[in-house]
């Protein structure tokens, strides 16, 4: 059995797309214009195109809503759509080549030159005229005077005349008049004169100009995700920079007066700030640049000050904690007052409380995640990862789902989409996923054992051993 990838992870087929990326059916409604890059004082990268503010563009219920979801609760799709509508692709500009690793090429790359750029030798040996060595053999050496030596990088324009040879190194330009190279091993390696013990045909051991790439060829299409091979090719073609959307700069802030920096003293009532490290790593894994801000306490003034200080370097802010129903939910309290961030209950577990909007004059997008570690992780996977990919112009935005056979029963309550931690493996019988025991949103030990999230739909209350289930296989590049 194959692992049956089902394409984009969207449940109902809505795949919002950025204007620069290839389109597929159903994308039109979220196509947005991209403004030219602008630079605010102190910014190191052009700002992202400003799409509609979240509150100005309420999510349109564009697909059937599972019947079991309570009124007033957003579906996962609704919340994701709201985020993707509210966060546009960053404006593309020239990126240093190595920095472009993992970014999609903004426009097709047309080769400005032939590769190889000139006929050159594929071996160390002697450049000759093939007709001069046509009769050469082990018992019938041909003796030729050596009129010079050409190394790779030698600028000397060489030409040979009939009955002569030039010593030549791998990669060096073939002198005019020569049409073959005899390798050193088939000669006596002479310097003034050389004995040649093998014949050579026209073109032997010559790498001809334009053999690999012809000037004017489209060598990399628009949207090609740049890896080491593509970057190597671009450099070989003389491009020190390449046009791509930049890596988004994501500021990660965790909130909670109980949080301490790992490695510092813990009182009986304090815990280590695991989330900001987990989220920072996830941001980086998604291909973005992360600025991890240590934990801030539950004082709204502190939170507001830290947030506003950070915006100068943020294309996106991600917070964890402080958004549920408690008395000291600092993120919700502070940002609700601004009126540009909406907090909702989303029909998912873990990850029920969520928020999204824009903040301050910069109108920087902010995604607020719940504080429970597993909730923060799952929320990142479901909402932040697609947003980062959209900013970079990487499609699909969402991780493709994989079908796998369930190894033990799962029970769920109706009205929420459950993301159950599991272990995915491919056995000789096909793809299999085993749910891990322990559903608590605080269980980071279990989270670290998982490599997959099993999806239980909103209207499903049970998945049984042997069922084929939808699974997000984590950590896989896509
Ligand atoms: N009365 C209700 N209480 C709660 C509800 C509810 O609906 N009614 N929802 C629960 C759910 S579900 C979640 S999820 C959490 C989300 O709460 P917050 O986003 O406000 O998060 P906090 O209260 O700040 O923290 C929750 C939990 O996570 C720990 N935490 C927070 N930050 C970190 C961090 N950076 N590293 C490690 N652990 C962290 C924190 O200590 C708490 O234990 O609310 C439920 N409550
Ligand atoms: O929804 Mo909370 O995220 O279950 O723990």
Image (cartoon, grey):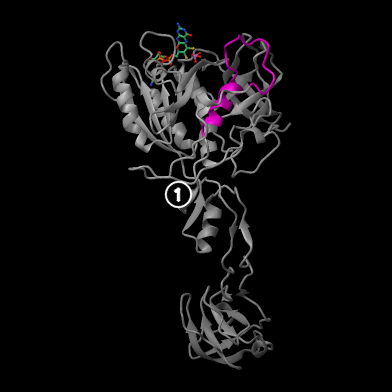
Give residue 105's position: percent from left, percent from top: 56, 50
- Stretch of the chain drawn in magenta: 61-87
Q: Residue at left 46%, top 80%?
A: 155
Whether residue 276 is situated above or below residue 68 in the rendered picture: below
Instruction: Judge left or right: residue 295 versus residue 200.
Output: left
Q: Residue at left 57%, top 13%?
A: 73
Give residue 134's position: percent from left, percent from top: 68, 87
Whether residue 449 can be seen here: no
Q: Nearest the camera: 124 or 257?
A: 257
Q: Say whether mark 1 is within 8 Å of ligand 1.
A: no
Is 365 inside the magenta-drawn segment?
Answer: no
Q: Nearest the camera: 406 or 54?
A: 54
Whether residue 475 is situated above or below residue 108 in the rendered picture: above
Q: Quadrant of residue 294?
A: top left
The residue that mark 1 highlights is 99
- For mark 1, does the 10 Å Cα neighbourhood hold few (<14), some (14 to 19), or many (20 or more) residues? some
Whether residue 46 is situated above or below residue 473 in the rendered picture: below
Q: Residue furthest front?
A: 56
Say which element carries label 1: helix
Instruction: Judge left or right: residue 384 versus residue 296.
Output: right
Whether residue 399 can be seen here: yes
């Amino acid at each position: 059995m194959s692992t049956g990838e089902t394409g984009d992870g969207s449940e109902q087929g809505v795949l919002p797309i950025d204007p620069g990326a290839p389109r597929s059916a159903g994308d039109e409604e979220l196509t947005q214009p991209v403004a030219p890059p602008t630079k605010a004082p102190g910014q190191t990268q052009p700002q992202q195109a400003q799409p509609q503010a979240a509150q100005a563009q309420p999510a349109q219920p564009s697909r059937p809503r599972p019947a079991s979801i309570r009124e007033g609760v957003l579906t996962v799709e609704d919340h994701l759509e709201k985020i993707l509508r509210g966060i546009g692709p960053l404006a593309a500009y020239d990126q240093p080549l190595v920095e472009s690793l993992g970014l999609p090429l903004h426009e097709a790359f047309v080769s400005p030159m032939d590769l190889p750029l000139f006929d050159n030798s594929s071996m160390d040996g002697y450049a000759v005229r093939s007709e001069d060595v046509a009769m050469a053999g082990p018992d019938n050496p041909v003796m030729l005077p050596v009129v010079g030596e050409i190394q790779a990088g030698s600028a000397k324009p060489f030409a040979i005349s009939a009955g002569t040879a030039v010593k030549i190194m791998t990669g060096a330009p073939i002198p005019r008049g020569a049409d073959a190279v005899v390798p050193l091993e088939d000669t006596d390696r002479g310097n003034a004169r050389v004995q040649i013990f093998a014949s050579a045909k026209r073109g032997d051991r010559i790498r001809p100009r334009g053999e690999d790439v012809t000037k004017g060829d489209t060598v990399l299409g628009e949207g090609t995700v740049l890896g080491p091979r593509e970057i190597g090719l671009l450099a070989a073609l003389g491009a020190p920079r390449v046009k791509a959307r930049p890596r988004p700069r994501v500021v990660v802030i965790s909130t909670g007066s109980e949080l301490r920096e790992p490695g510092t003293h813990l009182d009986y009532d304090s815990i280590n700030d695991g989330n900001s490290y987990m989220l920072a790593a996830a941001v980086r894994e998604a291909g973005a640049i992360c600025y991890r801000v240590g934990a801030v306490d539950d004082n709204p003034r502190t939170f507001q000050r830290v947030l506003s200080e950070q915006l100068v370097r943020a294309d996106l802010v991600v917070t964890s904690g402080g958004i549920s129903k408690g008395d000291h939910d600092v993120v919700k309290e502070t940002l609700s007052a601004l009126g540009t961030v909406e907090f909702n209950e989303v029909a998912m577990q873990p990850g029920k409380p969520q928020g999204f909007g824009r903040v301050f004059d910069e109108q920087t997008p902010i995604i607020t995640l719940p504080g429970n570690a597993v909730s923060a992780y799952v929320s990142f996977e479901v909402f932040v990862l697609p947003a980062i990919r959209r900013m970079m112009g990487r499609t699909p935005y969402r991780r493709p789902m994989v079908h796998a056979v369930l190894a033990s029963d799962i029970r769920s309550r109706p009205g929420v989409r459950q993301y159950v931690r599991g272990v995915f493996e491919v056995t000789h019988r096909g793809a299999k996923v085993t749910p891990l025991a322990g559903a608590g949103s605080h269980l980071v030990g279990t989270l670290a054992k998982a490599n997959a999230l099993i999806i239980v739909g909103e209207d499903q209350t049970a998945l049984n051993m042997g069922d084929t289930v939808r699974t997000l296989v984590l950590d896989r590049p896509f």
